[in-house]
Image (spheres, grey):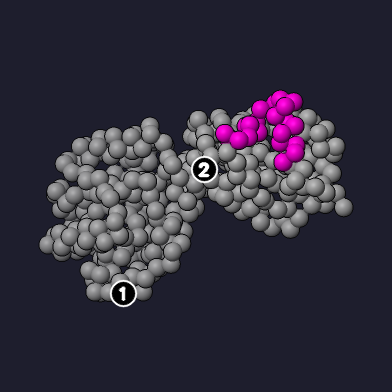
């Protein structure tokens, strides 16, 4: 039985790593993937290992381990150096005492294997198949979005939610922001499933909650790390309290799907427009108070967006640009 291992930071895990692991699996009977996680890195080894486990969850002969270390005690694994390779070879020998094969795409792979007295097989060292590094991904997540496996994308997705009561321009602004940023958009499920705000039942809100979460989870895997979301679960819960006087119980995964980096709340200080399916203007304003109460109860911090239509667009763009400039720290 041939037992092999690969190691790396996987910071983040990308399709080049995925291809290397698939290659390694073709060369052995059992494969271990070791995530080397330093105390100086801001994405934990457990999160990185979860990406790999998710990607290979249907492959029985692969395991993923995490090795946490302090940079004050051990050198960086990414350095090609005889002395560094000797240090890490001793650690790997303890981790994998009965393994006979190492697969890497780096020059230091053969050095480590020599110290361990095992075989080394190089994979795509020129990176001709996937000409990108994890550093490049971290530096420009938009440019390198398609190099990320689906298991990784949710962590780096930047979700922007537009909230507010009826007739405050959420749908129009969402579409405009999508076109401006050339990003993904999750339309409001409630508008598609409930034709009239005056005619629906409590059970309909569960359908809305589930469908909206499904749309968000699909959008996260689409062509952009930026996702604009028209309305979220808290608004659905507010409708439940406002219309039926009872809490809408939803599963934790619904909240997880809806969790966002930025919540923009559109004030009801614009002209009310009745399209024949909305609440009355007076009820609309009472619903606004309900929305705010539910958001406060769930400790959702919002940025108020007010003024005319152009002012709302410009303020929303400004807020989103701030998120893009300062980056996304992940929601998982």
Crowding at dot 1, Cα within 10 Å, few <14 / some 14-19 / many 20+, comes out as few
Residue 100 spot, x, y in % from top left: 84, 44
User: Which residue is under mark 2?
Assistant: 43
Q: Which residue is at 72% across, 41% downward?
A: 91
Towards the viewer: 280 or 140? 140
Q: Position of residue 89 (x, y in %)?
A: 75, 37
Q: Is residue 119 visible?
A: no
Q: Earlier in the sequence, mark 2 or mark 1?
A: 2
Badge 2: how crowded within 10 Å, few (<14), some, or many (20+)? some
Q: Quadrant of residue 329?
A: top left
Farthest residue in the right direction?
A: 1
- Image point 48% across, 34% down: which residue? 142
Q: Which residue is mark 1?
A: 201
Q: Which residues are magenta?
A: 71-91
Q: From this viewpoint, which residue is outermost toward the left? A: 282
Q: Is residue 172 highlighted in magenta?
A: no
């Amino acid at each position: 039985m041939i037992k092999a291992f690969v190691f790396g930071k996987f910071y983040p895990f990308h399709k080049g790593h995925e291809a290397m692991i698939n290659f390694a699996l073709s060369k052995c009977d059992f494969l271990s993937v070791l995530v080397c996680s330093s105390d100086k890195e801001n994405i934990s080894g457990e999160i990185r290992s979860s990406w790999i486990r998710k990607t290979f969850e249907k492959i029985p002969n692969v395991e993923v381990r995490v090795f946490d270390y302090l940079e004050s005690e051990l050198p960086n694994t990414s350095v090609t150096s005889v002395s560094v390779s000797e240090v890490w070879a001793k650690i790997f020998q303890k981790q994998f005492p009965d393994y006979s094969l190492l697969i890497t795409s780096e020059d230091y792979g053969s050095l480590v294997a020599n110290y361990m007295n095992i075989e080394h097989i190089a994979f795509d060292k020129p990176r001709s198949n996937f000409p990108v590094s994890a550093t490049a991904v971290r530096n420009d997540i938009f440019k390198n979005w398609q190099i990320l496996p689906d298991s990784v994308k949710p962590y780096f997705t930047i979700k922007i939610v537009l909230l507010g009561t009826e007739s405050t321009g959420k749908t129009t602004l969402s579409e405009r922001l999508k076109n401006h940023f050339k990003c993904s958009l999750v339309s409001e499920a409630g508008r598609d499933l409930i034709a009239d705000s005056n005619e629906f039942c409590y059970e309909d809100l569960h359908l809305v909650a589930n469908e909206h979460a499904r749309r968000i989870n699909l959008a996260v895997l689409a062509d952009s790390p930026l996702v604009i979301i028209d309305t979220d679960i808290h608004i659905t819960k507010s409708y439940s309290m406002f219309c039926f006087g009872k809490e809408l119980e939803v599963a934790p995964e619904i909240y997880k799907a809806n969790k966002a980096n930025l919540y923009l709340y559109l004030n009801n200080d614009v002209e009310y427009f009745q399209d024949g399916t909305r609440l009355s203007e007076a009820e609309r304003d009472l619903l606004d108070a309900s929305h705010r109460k539910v958001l406060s109860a769930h400790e959702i911090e919002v940025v108020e967006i007010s003024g005319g239509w152009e002012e709302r667009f410009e303020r929303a763009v400004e807020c989103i640009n701030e998120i893009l400039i300062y980056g996304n720290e992940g929601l998982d």
